Image (spheres, rainbow, N blue to C red):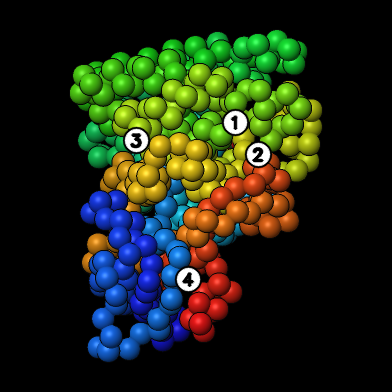
Amino acid sequence: MSANEGNLIIEGVRILDPSRDLDAKGHLVVQEGKVTACDAGPAPEGGVDLPRVDAKGLVVAPGFVDLHVHFREPGFEDKETIETGSAAAAAGGFTTVVTMPNTSPAVDTAAVVHLVRNKGLAAGQCRVLPAAAVTHNLEGKSMCQYGDMVDAGAVALTDDGQPVRDAGLFRHVLEYSRILGVPVITHAEDETLSAEGVMHEGKWSTRLGLKGIPAAAEVVGVARDIELARLSGARMHVAHVSSRGALELIRRAKDQGVAVTAETAPHFLDFTDADCATYDSRFKMRPPLRSMDDQQALVEALADGTLDCISSDHAPHTPNEKEQPFDLAPFGVVGLETAFAACHDRLVRRGSFSLLDLVRLMSLAPARIIGSEGGTLRPGAAADFTLIDTETSWMPRERDLLSKGRNCPWLGRSLTGRVQATYLAGRLTHGQRWAQEAVAR
Ligand code: DOR
């Protein structure tokens, strides 16, 4: 760390701090990696002699927190590594990510939890918090040593990528999670309904001659898991919600006091099953892109609190894998580098959300679900933040992606709002050139 790393004053910036409902022009002071002041009005002159960054025209927000990323390490380093995934996260304004355990070996022992954490620390681009598997090798058969994995730093339990088929086993996992104080993240899906499907079942799957996955596959899965969460009294988080029917069940469960939270992903807010019309596998993920009506329901659910947060479900695959025909290509899209801009376009520019609402959905709200201290710019907090230009339009290009994945559905589309810099504990993790220019200004 250089002498001045972790120390700076950001001036003339629009502060968005959802933990204080603060949206005001002001300044942010960072000392030794922590926020020491963040208030409306100009930065005090004199006093501490810190490098000053003139961030006029930019927004400062708490670093984004993503509860759902696939960094593929160990085992699938040709798709992504913890280092390349972390760099993509920093470029997208993220300072904390929760990694899914569907690696090889799976994150099903304390040793693999340690490995992921240590690789995250070595990469040093964001806080990499592993979610640990519910069952050994995600096979749905036998339970893991949850206490050991939580002690090693696992922040959630999940078999994401697939549902836990055995309801009785899942019930017991929920009961253990309650004792351990970590949420269970459910990939809710009835596989007897999704079967061999590759896209949403509807008029587009018929027209394209592709086998469909009915929304009912998700709705049935969510219905079962909500009943198990109710029975166990555990905290359950529903991953990548895509359908109106699932939202109706989650809304009712919340009203009844079940401890359920839920996320959706940016791709569900921006695309529909009609986008599969070109058989482009960049639009193939699980659950699949659904109808316009489902998309409308997701936006309403983000507004009324049925959905708590937005997670990217960043799921890189190699170009070779994704270049196969639509029905053969693996499920998954990358989205860390485009998440903010896509949501800003859809929810703020074309929708009725305030910028503060969006920042909350991407920082404070997900942080609370895993009990992390992120999502705030309060004095005393770690200086994890991002600087954003909300006016700039840009076009994501393949060659600019820091993720190894090229399977990004926003490539070649114009987006408005761009992360200019990201800081982790006051240290720049993205935007070197920009920050040097800003300091020199
Ligand atoms: O599209 C998806 N890709 N959905 C999942 O649930 C898993 C993920 C992956 O691991 O590629």
Judged by depth in the image, the label closer to the viewer, 2 or 1, is: 1
User: In the rendered structure, which disc, 3 or 4, sits on the residue that comes first in sequence?
Assistant: 3
Tag 4's secondary structure? Answer: strand
The residue at 71%/46% (across/down) is 412
Using the rendered image of the protein, determine whether residue 151 is visible from the camera's viewpoint: no
- Position of residue 127 measured from the top left corner of the image (x, y, whole percent): 42, 57
User: In the rendered structure, which disc, 3 or 2, sits on the residue that comes first in sequence?
Assistant: 3
**In the rendered structure, are the residues bearing label 2 and label 1 in contact, judged by CB atoms less than 8 Å apart?**
yes
Q: CA distance from mark 2 to mark 4?
A: 28 Å
> What number is the disc on residue 271?
1
Is residue 313 or residue 394 the one in the foreground?
394
**In the rendered structure, are the residues bearing label 2 and label 4 in contact, judged by CB atoms less than 8 Å apart?**
no
Q: CA distance from mark 3 to mark 4?
A: 29 Å
User: In the rendered structure, which disc, 4 or 1, sits on the residue that comes first in sequence?
Assistant: 1
Q: Give the left or right position of residue 45, taking residue 283 as reference.
A: left
Beta carbon of the mark 1 residue lies under 8 A of ligand 1: no
Residue at numbered disc 2: 409
